[in-house]
Image: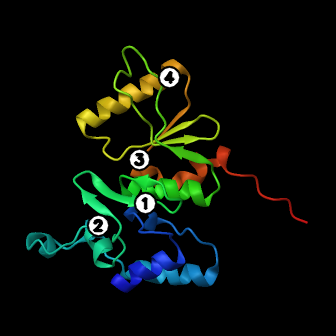
Amino acid sequence: MVWALRRLVEIEFSGPPSVAQLNRLHISDPDTADAAMLCRFLIPRPALATERARTYKTARTWAQWLHLAGLLEEGLRTSRGTITVATDGHPCRSMLERHIDDFLHHRGIAHDIEPAYPRHADLNTTGLRADWLLYDGTYVEALGMPDEPAYAAKVARKRELAQHTGIRLITLTAEDLTRLPEIFAFWLPAAEPTR
């Protein structure tokens, strides 16, 4: 299992993958795609842990598997996620953020991290920040805990503030990770003409 995780990082990902990244192949070379699929068969899926493993608390979390494989050596596990550094050097507070940042980087979509939202007397008195700012002024948010009430309230304020100030805002959850090419189609660089 550890070998399969390490091998996937070598052939398909630029760093530790999130669980959601495993649902879809991100490579098109047939030989490499076959190897990536075989690795996926060996990789543990914490959500599929047997009842016995859960009963005896022997099932590992995804972060524990990544750590066991030596893929989170530079990462720091907190109660809210794993802090790592994306391929382009941007700090990320969760695997979700890293997945999105790596997608933006590898697809050539220019982005800056943690842009400040405009001040507003009611909606932004504390200096709210987004996760990314795209080159055309679009803000992007990775919603890691959308079901937590305080977090959801802060997201609602950001959405209202974006609407009030005319900012285009994209919000992403783990469920959106398989649709990133579709969501960011507008910002993807045009393919070079064939000669």
Q: Relative to 137, is 161 above or below?
A: above
Q: Going from the N terminus, do you reach mark 4 or mark 2 first?
A: 2
Q: Going from the N terminus, do you reach mark 1 or mark 3 first?
A: 1
Q: Give the distance between the C-alpha atoms of the residues marked 1 and 3, in whole angstroms.
A: 19 Å
- The residue to which callout 1 is attached is 85
Report if the CB atoms under discs 4 and 1 are less than 8 Å apart: no
Report if the CB atoms under discs 3 and 4 are less than 8 Å apart: no
> Colour mode?
rainbow
Residue type, label 3? Thr
Residue type, label 2? Ala
- The residue to which callout 3 is attached is 173
Looking at this rendering, what residue extends furthest in the right direction?
195
- The residue to which callout 4 is attached is 163
Q: Give the distance between the C-alpha atoms of the residues marked 3 and 2, in whole angstroms.
A: 18 Å
Q: Relative to 156, is 56 above or below?
A: below
Of labels 1 and 3, the one closer to you: 1
Residue at (41, 29) in percent of width and height: 158
Looking at this rendering, what residue extends furthest in the left direction?
56
- x, y percent for residue 156: 37, 28
